[in-house]
Amino acid sequence: MEKKAAAQECYKMKFNWKHILLFLAVLGPGIITASVDNDAGGIATYSIAGAHFGYSLLWTLIPITIVLIIVQEMAARMGAVTGKGLADLIRENFGLKITLWITIGLLIANIATTIAEFAGIAAAAGMFGISKYLIVPFAAIIIFWLVLRSNYKTLEKIFLILSLFYVTYIISGFMAKPDWGLALKSTLVPSFQFNANYLLVFIGVIGTTITPWMQFYLQSSIVEKGIRTDNYKYSKWDVIIGCFITNIVSFFIIVASAATIFVAGIQIVDATDAAHALAPLAGSYAAALFAFGLFSAALFGAFILPLSTSFYICEGFGWESGVNKKFREAPQFYVLFSAIILISAAVILIPKINLIYLMLASQVINGILLPVVLVSMLKLTNNKKLMGEYTNSKIYNFFVWIAIVGIGALSILLVLTTIFPNLFAFI
């Protein structure tokens, strides 16, 4: 009996190790896609949320996490079942016309966002005394060289390493010595303020977390990695863990700003303002960690946004794509990637460049496209010919529709408030 029990225990250990190894094998796309969502723009939004409204917006991270998991899971599942990217499926099922409009919109929005990433690189490096005329070309060359010379497996390791640098925000949050009781209460108990600035930041927090490009990149990376239905359950956990990690980081960015900048009554407009303000309030180490986190996040975004753009444009037009292919095998993919990097880096090097209108255009386009992309995803994941037994359940569809209606309404508000900044002035 003892030998039998020992044998069963040994089998259980092997079984568990098998699951762990399989999970580690598929680990990457979910964590990377969710992590890079905390890019330069996202960090700025969360910093402003904490600096202007303290802990009061922390509760939004719970529904945001749930919706992000739902949306990202659908994209990952489609990639595993069909072996095709989202743009490819949209073209095949909805026609070239809608694909063309989505592609044009995303191209403009993603170039604007990539420019913002290089602006984040320049701003963060400037805090350490490094000129943008040195760091921006250097970063662009490194990004271009690594993508051109590496395969997906190597790039995925680099991206996972960059994901680890988000821990700097968690450390900064602890160093700020927040009121943990109030932070916990604000996370679990929803609150709302009926004033214009609160509504704008509230919409911004949600809008910066769920964006159209994420779905395209995640699905393309699932396909690029070769994940199929037999190991999708492990990839699903990769997606779920990634969504939790990114919003844990968001939590600590808000907490760090709330515990210091909000308490001191300092007004900020971006993430570098937050890093500067942290120095006298939480110490120079906390400020340096915050700035370093901004640099690594912006660099991460400068990798992913051009890759995402190149993936969906090539898929949409039926061109070869993927970092596992050589330049001669996928010339359009690499030309697009290079052009986006070159344009984005060059814009930042223009003296006294004002990026506000580019950022506004990016917000408007993303706000318009997001509901279209989400409805397309829902139709695709319920197509039995396409998904077979992996279509959504009725309960799942119910929650997805609630998410789409909510995100759609907020996207419309985001567009309106961007075009008409005084929309809520009467409140």
Image (spheres, rainbow, N blue to C red):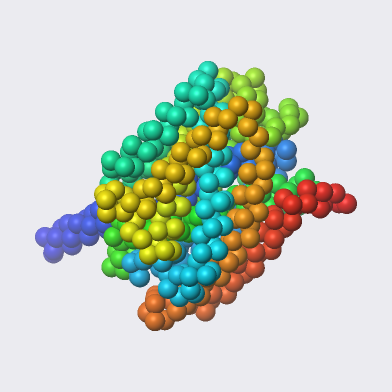
Task: Give the left or right position of residue 146, taking residue 393 as reference.
Answer: left
The residue at the point 37 percent across, 38 percent down is 144
Task: Give the left or right position of residue 112, taking residue 324 as reference.
Answer: right
Q: Which of 162 and 308 is in front in this view?
A: 308
| Residue 199 image point, x, y percent | 75, 51
Image: 76 above or below 249: below
Task: Give the left or right position of residue 312, taking residue 192 as reference.
Answer: left
Q: Is residue 53 visible?
A: yes
Image: 377 above or below 138: below
Q: Which of 426 and 260 is in front in this view?
A: 426
Task: Give the left or right position of residue 185, taking residue 198 as reference.
Answer: left
Q: In which quarter of the image is residue 1?
A: bottom left
The residue at the point 39 percent across, 33 percent down is 141
- Residue projecting furthest to the right: 426
Image: 51 above or below 100: above
| Residue 142 image point, x, y percent | 37, 33
Question: What is the number of callouts on the image?
Answer: 0
Q: In which quarter of the image is residue 347?
A: top right
- Residue projecting furthest to the left: 3
Q: Nearer the viewer, residue 282 or 151?
A: 151
The residue at the point 33 percent across, 46 percent down is 156
Q: Is residue 25 visible?
A: no
| Residue 231 image point, x, y percent | 29, 64
| Residue 225 image point, x, y percent | 30, 56
